[in-house]
Amino acid sequence: MKVLYGLSAVIMLVMLSSCSKVPQAEIDNARLAIEAAQTAQADVYVPEQFAALQDSFNAVNESIETQKSKWFRSFKAEKEKLAAINTQAEQVKMNAETRMNEVKAEVVATIDEIKSLQEMNNQLVTQAPKGKEGAAAIEAIKADITVVDAALIEAQQLFDNGDFMAALNKVNAAKEKAYAINAELKEVMEKYAKMKGGRK
């Protein structure tokens, strides 16, 4: 019986020691998975998901620190959570890559849209009234058109450098400006047409 008790004690000690070891390999793997997600610019393209991933990892680390202070400690739950974080990190990485491709496509489409709009705006400028009443307004509009053209060049440079989110922000602002110019030109043309019609 003493032998059996002795064996039982040894088995218990082995089980406790295996449970009590800090899961350093699992921690390192989770950290590497998060770093891989960050390399894929998850913090840029899916910032909320990446922040949640980091929060999960930090929470597990805090839980591990709490377990380390206990006399009878077990990291089973933490190991499971770290494994889940690995899976979560891989998904966040994939989501970031998907979003990046969506942003790239959106930038290209928006640049094409702005270019077409700019062609229309330049054409409207040539048709705008040249008299004293509209001259100052048209010159200001021409300056705004130049600003949009410059923004398109900057956006293309950002895109070529791989800074797709910054390029998207730039073209969205340029698009808003281009549509505002278009609306202003149409308003000038309408006012001129009414004045011209009234003089007849």
Image (spheres, rainbow, N blue to C red):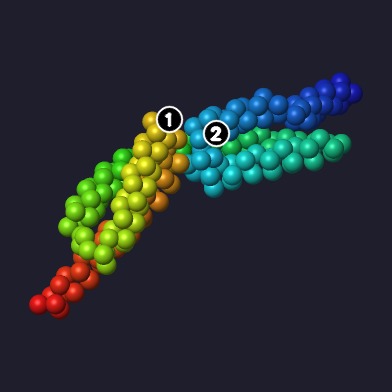
* Front in this rendered view, residue 33 or 133: 133
* Front in this rendered view, residue 73 or 8: 73
Which residue does the image show at 19% across and 74% down from the upper left?
Answer: 195
Which residue occupies the extreme front position in the image? Answer: 132
Which residue does the image show at 76% across and 27% down from the upper left?
Answer: 21
Left-right relation of 126 to 173: left
Q: Which residue is labeled 1 in the image?
A: 161
Inspect the image, locate mark 1, and give the three-letter code of the amino acid beneath it: Asn
Which residue occupies the extreme left position in the image? Answer: 200
Left-right relation of 11 to 166: right
Query: Which secondary structure lies at badge 2?
Result: helix
Q: Is residue 121 positioned above or below 4 on the image?
A: below
Query: Which secondary structure lies at badge 1?
Result: loop
Q: Which residue is labeled 2 in the image?
A: 38
Q: Is residue 19 positioned above or below 177 on the image?
A: above
Q: Is residue 8 positioned above or below 182 on the image?
A: above
The x, y position of residue 60, in whole percent, is: 69, 40
Q: In the figure, residue 28 lies in which quadrant?
A: top right
Q: Counting other residues with Cα less than 10 Å from the Cα at mark 2, is it few (<14), some (14-19), or many (20 or more)?
A: some
